[in-house]
Every structure is written in C-alpha cells, then in structure tokens.
Amino acid sequence: MKIRTLLTALALLASGAAWGQAGLAAASGTARGDFQIGCSTCPHFQLGLTGNPVQSQSGPLAAQVDYLGQPVGDPNTAGYSLGGGVEYHASAALQGALATPLLGAYARADNEPVVILADPAQLEIGIDLYAATAVARTQQTYHYLGASTTTYHFDFHVDGTLSSTRASAFGSAAIYTGQDPSFEVGLIDFGYSSHSGVGLLYNPQAFGGDFSVSITVDPGASFVLISQLSASVQMTYDTTDVLADASHTLRLTAITGGDPSLLVTAVPEPSAALLLSLGLIALLRLRRERR
C-alpha cells in the first residue's frame, strides 16, 4: 500500500511540474535504398537496409540520432551485386542562459554500380541508389519581464557543404503565441534559409545564409521559438555520391532590439524536480525493506 501511494504521488508530481513548458530538443531522420536496372524509367526494387537509428537524449535540452545502413539482399536482387550505403546524423541542443538553439544535420549517399555476379565482363547494368534526410528541432518558451512593449529580433546563421544539386539544406525559425499546443495557429513570424548544391558531379561547395524572426511583446507576455534544420540527399540515376553536411551549423547569433536580460526561459521547477528525486529514493528504500 505504501508503494502504491508513493507511486501515485510521484505520478501526480511529475504531471504537475512545469515540464510541458520547458525547452525541448529532438533529432530524427529517414533513409531508403533503391536498386534500379538500366535507367531511371526501367524496373527498380526497393532495397532493405541494415541497422537501426541510434537515439540519444541528454535530458529535454539535447538530442541526437545516428544511422548507418547498407543494402540487404532479397529475391529481387539475387544474382546482382549489392554495394554502397547511406547514413544520416542530426543533433539538437538548447544552450546557454537563454537556452538558444544549436542544430546540426548531415546526410550522405554512397551510390554504387550494379553488375550481374555471374557475368565475367562485370558490365554495369544498374545502380544501387540511396536517399536520406536528417532533421534537428528545438522548441523554447520565453517570458518577457519588461515594463513596456518591446520588439525583439532573433538573428540566425546556417552554413555547411553541399556536393551537388541532389543535396540540400534548409534552416528555419518560427515564433508562435504558444496558445495552441499543436502550433497550427498563432504564427507570428517565420524566417528561413534554403540551399541546394551545384552541378551533377561530386563537387562539394560551401554555403551560408542568414535570416531572422521578430516579435513585439507586451509586459508579461510569453511566446514560443521553434527552430529547425534539415539536410537531404536525393536519388537520380547516377553513381556519383551525394553529401549534405550542415553539422552543428544552425545557430542563434544575436537577440537584438530589446534587452535580452528581460527574457527568461521556461524550465522545470527546481522544487518539483527535487521532490521527484527524493520520492524515487524513498521508493527504492521501501522496496529493500519489503525484501
């Protein structure tokens, strides 16, 4: 009975704390493979891929995902060579006193020619192609403590390397009122920086861009800043590898227009977090006593 009562109290405590308003970081990605014979309009078969994404979460303010996959054979690919692979990585963190975003995204496709294994000439008859997208995202709630209406500008920078037109990177930020949990309404401002590589061959070129979002806040008002970065590599009928490298490169460079010290972030309540820790310790002690 004591354990059941304590568990109920802990559940209520966790749900009552201000975790829902605190900063959140997330990282995700997708990857796929395709075996194409002859040309882009000829028969093709989806390739199975090895491995699973490795997710790591250092509390609500930092997240990372890493994936490396290689092709898996099936009846459709029997007798054909399988090669190459695909990978993606993404990281998201809220850093510093104002929990500002630092995002990274990386995607790479290692496309390889396909031959018939029994063919002595080993002539190329198709291509193992890959595509991937990595996405990093942060969400932070800010409260304004000033005594007069003020306009804030959040300035962002994104940079990296793209290998060709099949590689792209997209960084964005949006400010919402925060009154709609799903963020379908309440958009105040949106800014972005979109980039694509040049040419069809593997020729990595640096890219960079700046953008900003703004909000005018009244005393005591709150708002939500959502930042996102994606890196993508796409398929076309070509064995050339594709790279989209925007690792750790979307960042907030400045908060201007108003005094940043008048902005505070939503964080878990220290007292609730402390009580939760003490409750878990007490639960462990009760379990030991029952043994």
Image (cartoon, grey):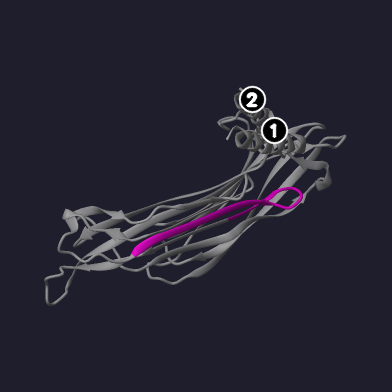
In terms of image quadrants, where is residue 253?
bottom right
Instruction: Judge depth for marks 2 and 1 and give the one in front.
Output: 2
User: Distance between the Cα atoms at labels 2 and 1?
Assistant: 26 Å
Pinpoint residue 45: horizontal percent, then vertical percent.
22, 53
- Please give left or right for residue 51 compared with residue 114 in the image: right
- Please give left or right for residue 264 compared with residue 21 in the image: right
Is residue 88 placed above or below 124 in the rendered structure?
above
Name the residue type under label 2. Lys
Q: Is residue 194 visible?
A: no
Pinpoint residue 284: horizontal percent, then vertical percent.
63, 38
The stretch drawn in magenta includes residue 15:
no
* Closer to the camera in the image, 53 or 212: 53
The kind of secondary structure the magenta stretch mainly shows is: strand
Q: Is residue 83 visible?
A: yes
Q: Residues within 10 Å of mark 2 (few under 14, many from 20)?
A: few
- Please give left or right for residue 61 compared with residue 79 in the image: right
* Closer to the camera in the image, 32 or 15: 15
Image: magenta residue range: 85-103
* Residue at the spot 78% in from the left edge and 41% down from the top edge: 264
Residue 107 marker? none
Residue 18 marker? 1
* Closer to the camera in the image, 185 or 75: 75
- Which residue is disc 2 drawn over? 2
Disc nearer the start of the sequence (2/1)? 2
Pinpoint residue 236: horizontal percent, then vertical percent.
32, 59
Is residue 117 placed above or below 229 in the rendered structure?
below
Name the residue type under label 1. Ala
Secondary-structure class at tag 1 = helix
In terms of image quadrants, where is residue 127?
bottom left
* Closer to the camera in the image, 285 or 116: 285
* Residue at the spot 34% in from the left edge and 69% down from the top edge: 240
